Image (cartoon, helix red, strand yellow):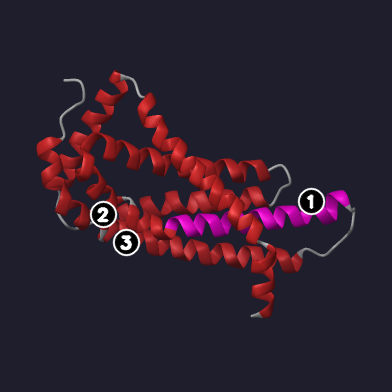
Amino acid sequence: MRTFRHTLKEQTILYVFVAVLFLVGVIFGALMVNALSLEQQQDLGRYLQNFFMTVDQSGDAAGAQSFWSIAGLHLKWVGLIWFLGLSVIGLPGILILDFLKGVLIGFSVGYLVGEFSWKGLLFSLVSVAPSNLLIIPVIIVTSVSAIAFSLHVIKNRVMLHNRVNVTGPFARYVGLTLVMCLLMLGVSSFETWVTPTMMKWVTPVLVETAAVPGT
């Protein structure tokens, strides 16, 4: 417990930095909505209209194929961050991935709210928010762990040229990443079997108003 508290205290600055970077990405993504051309707005409008109709008309059952498809995306994201943390040159890539994750969420919510007002906000609350309440912390924890391990290697192997044994830090790094992967599998289960049901509560009102912008 003492080791955990000490590690958390040491990494507080990293947690703050990654969280702020992610928040900047969310803001940037929301602002990107205003930069869309009319043609892009029309394409997105058509896509969402078809998506809302598909969700509204689909059955409640979801198969294992959907689960593994969703889980694969989440695990690839965590796995990529883990892989980048193994190398010195991968450190900027971790920060870019965190920023991009924020951009994706900010753009998704920003477009839905901007296009469908309170209905878009309601849809975001049932489709985007629930799973991301866990996905975001998992991404942040994984990123901080990867950055900390990468900095440890840079400090001891590159700058100080110490032949420090990294077996212990590497084992903790791998163990934490595996725990984050298990959490992502739990999130994938929620997105596969719970989120579609929640979306079906909202899609009827969106199908009625999902007109293509500019038409």
- Is 150 magenta? The answer is yes
Judging by the rendered image, the residue that carries numbered circle 3 is: 190
User: Mark 2: which secondary structure?
Assistant: helix
Q: Earlier in the sequence, mark 1 or mark 3?
A: 1
Which stretch appears magenta? Answer: 135-159
**Kind of residue at disc 2:** Val
**Kind of residue at disc 3:** Phe
For image coordinates 62% across by 50% down, the residue present is: 83
**Kind of residue at disc 1:** Ile
User: Mark 3: which secondary structure?
Assistant: helix
Q: Position of residue 215 (x, y in %)?
A: 16, 20
| Mark 2 or 3: the one toward you | 2
Q: Is residue 114 above or below residue 213?
A: below
Judging by the rendered image, the residue that carries numbered circle 1 is: 154
Residue toward you, 80 or 197: 197
Look at the numbered discs 2 and 3 and tell me whether their residues touch, using CB distance below 8 Å.
Answer: no
What is the CA distance from the residue labelled 1 to the residue labelled 3? 38 Å
Look at the numbered discs 1 and 3 and tell me whether their residues touch, using CB distance below 8 Å.
Answer: no
Q: Earlier in the sequence, mark 2 or mark 1?
A: 2
User: Mark 1: which secondary structure?
Assistant: helix
For image coordinates 49% across by 59% down, the residue present is: 137
What is the CA distance from the residue labelled 2 to the residue labelled 1? 42 Å
Q: Position of residue 68 (x, y in %)?
A: 37, 55
In this picture, residue 89 sits left or right of residue 141: right
Judging by the rendered image, the residue that carries numbered circle 2 is: 126
Farthest residue toward the bottom?
1
Count residues near mark 1 (Cα–Cα under 10 Å), then give few for <14, some for 14-19, many for 20+. some
Count residues near mark 2 (Cα–Cα under 10 Å), then give few for <14, some for 14-19, many for 20+. some
Q: Position of residue 120 (x, y in %)?
A: 23, 43
